[in-house]
Amino acid sequence: MKRLFSILAIACIMAFGTVNASTNAYTVEAATTAVTTSFQNADPEATATEEKSFTQDVKERFIEGGPFFMGIVLLCLILGLAIAIERIIYLNLATTNTKRLTQNVEDALNSGGIEAAKEVCRNTKGPVASIFYQGLDRADEDLDAAEKAVVAYGGVQMGQLEKNVSWISLFIALAPMLGFMGTVLGMIDAFDKIEAAGDMNPSLVARGIKIALLTTVFGLIVAIILQIFYNYIIAKIDSIVNDMEDASITLMDLLVRHKRS
């Protein structure tokens, strides 16, 4: 009889252990399925958030800033970029291989005289070639006259290179100033709402202050973009002007040697 009770007790313990093991296995499996499902459900949302590009975010912020000041700031950017692109194209076309031009002019002077050198300058684009032509055109009169012509026409060419560049600097200064004005007017409007409500409730002024600050942000962005183009243009102009000055000195030396020969 004792042996029978022992066998029944062992069987009950084994059955209870099996049930517990099955329950634990089911619990683990359910938890794993739940976690996997949650990750699968979370993936589309994360993907949608990642798919929101920088340009879309900027567009939404721009619309939130309001049409008036944002429109003026955008106009400054468009006009500034248009002038900057036009100047960059003009300056790149005005760039000349000064050493090769000088060598061609010297060879023409030695072989065909002043007229041959002038023909070389006529067939070459750029301010350096134009300055050479003006100097050669006065070479028959006197070296002083040729030098004065070179200096005078060099000033004219510098004016052509710097044409409309001052407008870019104006837009660089104007864009952040308009942004600051929009911010100040937005803050005034926010305080007017506080005064009308008679209570310092953040929800009354939070959106107004955010919109006001957006105008400043976009004004600064426009100024930074235009400043990069402006610095490039100024550096390009300085490079061309230096080439013009060096070429002018070289031309006068060529004319002196040609007169002596």
Image: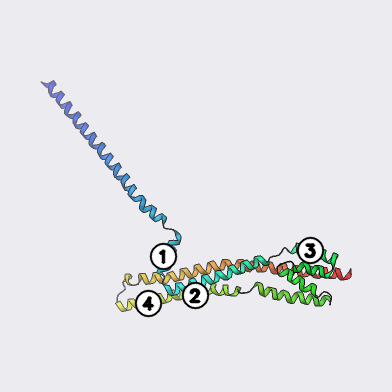
Circle nearer the N terminus (1, 4): 1
Location of residue 180 with respect to 36 vertically, above or below: below
Q: Residue 60 carries which label?
A: 1
Tags 2 and 3 touching, CB below 8 Å: no
Residue depicted at 82% across the width and 70% down the height: 115
Tags 1 and 4 touching, CB below 8 Å: no
Tags 4 and 2 touching, CB below 8 Å: no
Circle nearer the N terminus (2, 1): 1
User: Where does the image place residue 251, in percent across and percent down from the top left?
Assistant: 79, 69
Q: Which of marks 3 and 4 is in front?
A: 3
Is disc 4 surrounded by few (<14), some (14 to 19) or many (20+) residues within 10 Å? Answer: some
Residue depicted at 61% across the width and 69% down the height: 87
Residue depicted at 84% across the width and 68% down the height: 113
Q: Nearer the viewer, residue 32 or 95?
A: 95
Left or right: 164 in relation to 47: right
Element type at mark 2: helix
Alpha carbon distance from label 1 to label 3: 58 Å
